[in-house]
Amino acid sequence: MPAENEQSILDGVAGGLIVVSPDRTVARWNAWIVSASGRSSSAVAGKTLAEAFPSANVEVIERAVDSALAGGASTLLTNAMHPQLLPLHTPTGRPLLHDVIVSPLVDAGLNGCLVQVIDVTEATRRERFLRDRQNARYYALVESAPDVILNVDGEGVIRLANAAAARHFGYSAEELVGRKAADLFESEDAWLRIWQSVNVGSTSASPVEVQVRLRDGRLRYFELSAAPWTDGTRSFVTAILRDVENRRAAEAALRESERQSRANEKALAELNAALKETTDQLRLMDRRKNEFLATLAHELRNPLAPLRNGLQLLKIAKDDRALVERTRHMMDLQLEQMVRLIDDLLDVGRISNDRIALNKQTTTLDKVIRQAVETSNPLILAQQHSLTIELPAHELTLDADGVRLTQVFANLLNNAAKYTPAHGHITVKADEHEGSAVIRVIDDGIGIPGEMLPQVFEMFMRVDTSLERAQGGLGIGLSLVKRLVEMHDGSVEAVSRGQGLGSEFVVRLPLAKERAKTAEVEPGVTDPVPAPKRHRILVVDDNEDAAATLALLLGLMGHETRTANDGLAALAVTDEFHPDVALLDIGMPKLNGYDTARRLRQDSWGRDMLLVALSGWGQDADRLKSSKAGFDMHLVKPVDIAEIQRLLARRPAPSHQPA
Amino acid sequence: MIYKLLIVDDSKLARMAVIKVLNSCHPDWQRVEAGSAADALKAVKQEKPHIALIDFNMPHQDGLDLVVDLRALTPDMPIGIISANHQQQVVDRARALGASFLPKPLTEQSLREFLTGAAQRLQGVAS
Amino acid sequence: MSAAASGDVALSELQLDALTELVNLGVSRAAGNLAVMVREEVLLTVPKVALMSRVDAIRTLGARDSRQLVAVHQTFEGEIVGRAFLIFPEENSLDLVRSLVHSELSNEEIIELEQEALAETGNVILNSCLATIANSLESRLKISLPEVLRGESTQFFNLPPPPVAGSTVLFVYINFAVRRRNIEGFIAMLMDLPSLAALRDLLDALIRRTGGASRA
């Protein structure tokens, strides 16, 4: 074929053709190359490629040429691997992207090789455009997602992090890519578990709550879900993280408010229960109190009848000395009973108001027991019980209010006597045990049923109301006993094997550190009155009978007496009578006892008088008032004549006797 | 000076190629052939060659291991490693063992250079 | 080395020896080029050269590797005709590309380059291998452009060849690995019977050239 035809064929090819001679020089090239390179064929003929394109990166092509010429090898050089091999441009002046293929020309007449240049500009551009658009779509998808999306490779290293990751975690994408995903999590376990389950092949693990350590150091809860995928050769894991901190907080708040409301319900239920219990208690107490009042009224009336009868008897039988004596004795007892009842009643008040005051002194158990026995003796004798007392040989010393302790044991003995059928047996045993005195009052009486044992010491508690009524008593005794014993740092307990099987009351009292050595005031025993001194005594009371009878009694004892029935009268009598002792009732008309006393004290005569207040009230406040008004003593009505006698005994006789 | 040359290569053709080149340099020199590293060690003990040419790429024990063993026996023997594998790392390893490197296919020039150098070294040691 | 024989075509021990040495030369040159490209030492095994049936060849290859493979394939024609493959496990291909490209590229960019990089690399390696062999045999070969294939070894070796398919093939196999990288693969060549006869003649010529004027 003639050369010109060959050339026009070459020139017709839509691509570059360079014919290279065996000596590695350019033989010729086609029009396409001329246009793309701007160099004419003749300009480069006979030159090597390096000479033809001095500034270009042609060694690669030259190596391929050698390979073709020497070994017959064809070589492919792609734009992707070797960009811009030759300096070529498109008709519009843009860089022309090209692949180069070098292949041998093995032919009889034509040795050498062919360099083909293929324009891949458009193809490359289109590919890139499509890919970019595709990528852009996916990119937008991933970047616009509100949740964090991470792509993690087979070694657990983050390869991609979307914009949400930066927003939620605080780390930029650059900071995340290349890091191990496990580093993000507070506890590696959660991540490892998901990682393992995802990699073992379950299509996607169910979400797990994990804590992520944010860039600023805070911890925040996310819900992590993951799924594996592969691009054919390598496997990856997509991890999606959703911020659940607020949800958790809301859940926690909800749980807390539920818990609260349950707690509130429970508290409310408990309060209701407590309220009911208290209400029941109050009702019970109320009932008992009412019973008590009813009984009180009854009990108080009991002695009144015999007293009235007694008075009648005294009037009628005044000459029958024996009868008079018996009657007097009986009336005494009845009065005693009434006084005791009223004392108990006052004590009830004091117990309720916590106002019992102890007058502690050193005394012996022996004394206390004996005095209690004396007090209870009448009742014991009346029931014809046998009483046995077992006291230890050595003295047991107590630091106690003897009066009150006597009250305690008298009460227990009275109960023993009352609640044992006639001809019963009562035993009092006392002993020492580990620094305490232990006193047992044992009877073989009606006993206490088991279910009532815990309640015997309660106020207004009575075991058998019918029997109580028959025997008398208000049910205050044992509660008083308990209170008094406890005030002495002791304890009392009731023991019984049951109904009909007797009872035992055990009192424990701490022993005093020192033995009794000082002389004590002996409670309740009437001393024989020493040498009679004659006093001038004024008795003031608006109750004429009361004043008169008291004055009479005092007169019989050998004193000179006057009476007055109000404060003013008292003052008048004092002016004239000059008593050295005045017994003043407090509640009086015209001038009450306090004012009377104050006036008396202003007198020169009144200053040295023994002023004794007689009052129905014995509380500390009342005593204080009396003492402030100027009284020397405060006695509570009804007055124990022995008490007055003692007072008088202590007082020296008046210095002179008026006319 | 006539030296005895040990040629180690598992390929007979390769040994033939070496001998052919040797013939053009020093036709009078003696030559001993071995087809494996084991044979080479035996030959050294029996024939006591002065110089050794060893192929790098042999089965069972490659040429460089053999060089190590030879050095234990004859520390001063000039050794050349012949290899088609021209990778720099191989060349460096050969040099590190005190051996020269000759590329395959073996040219007369490279062999001549090696043998001259080897002879000089041997004469230097002898004197 | 093993003596190989099949049917009425056989290669003598010396011929096999020569062929092995040839292949060694070719592959060493190729490995040298690859080493330059990846800037790491490339380790080679001793070549295995054997005549066997196509079926056996497939089985042998399949026994060595059952993974998904990537192959660069070129044909050669001239006095001898056949195919050459440069084969990698698919999971290593991106690592190979990364070691070829000496700059930091993202995964996406590496993936985009993969096809071209494998093609060109295979091209260089196979060319150097085949060209060396051709030169040694003083026989001119025309070597095709590279084509990238994916699949299993059985698929590659069952390709209908441009040469007429025969049942016996010359099977050449060299294993290589890039030191310090997770890259390893093998080069395999298949030649069919008609080429074998021509090959024998070429080898004899080579032997003569090499051994000629020898005293040994």
Image (tube, helix red, strand yellow):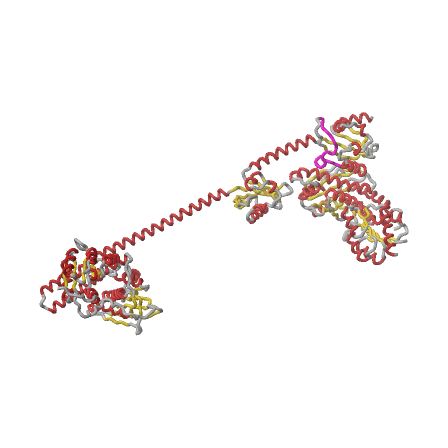
Task: Give, as a single range, the part of the protein colored magenta.
Answer: A75-91
The question of residue A78 being in magenta is answered with yes
Residue C120, position in %: x, y?
Answer: 73, 38
Of C146 and A362, nearer the camera is: A362
Decide if residue C42 is in sight here.
yes
Of C13 and A27, nearer the camera is: A27
Of A24 and A635, nearer the camera is: A635
Residue A459, position in %: x, y?
Answer: 27, 58
Asked where in the image residue A440 lies, by quadrant, the reply is bottom left
Residue B4, position in %: x, y?
Answer: 87, 54
Judge left or right: residue A548 versus residue A508: left
Q: Main secondary structure of the magenta part?
A: loop
Judge left or right: residue C3 versus residue A449: right
The question of residue B112 being in magenta is answered with no
Residue A167, position in %: x, y?
Answer: 55, 39
Q: Image height check: is A348 above or below A521? A: above
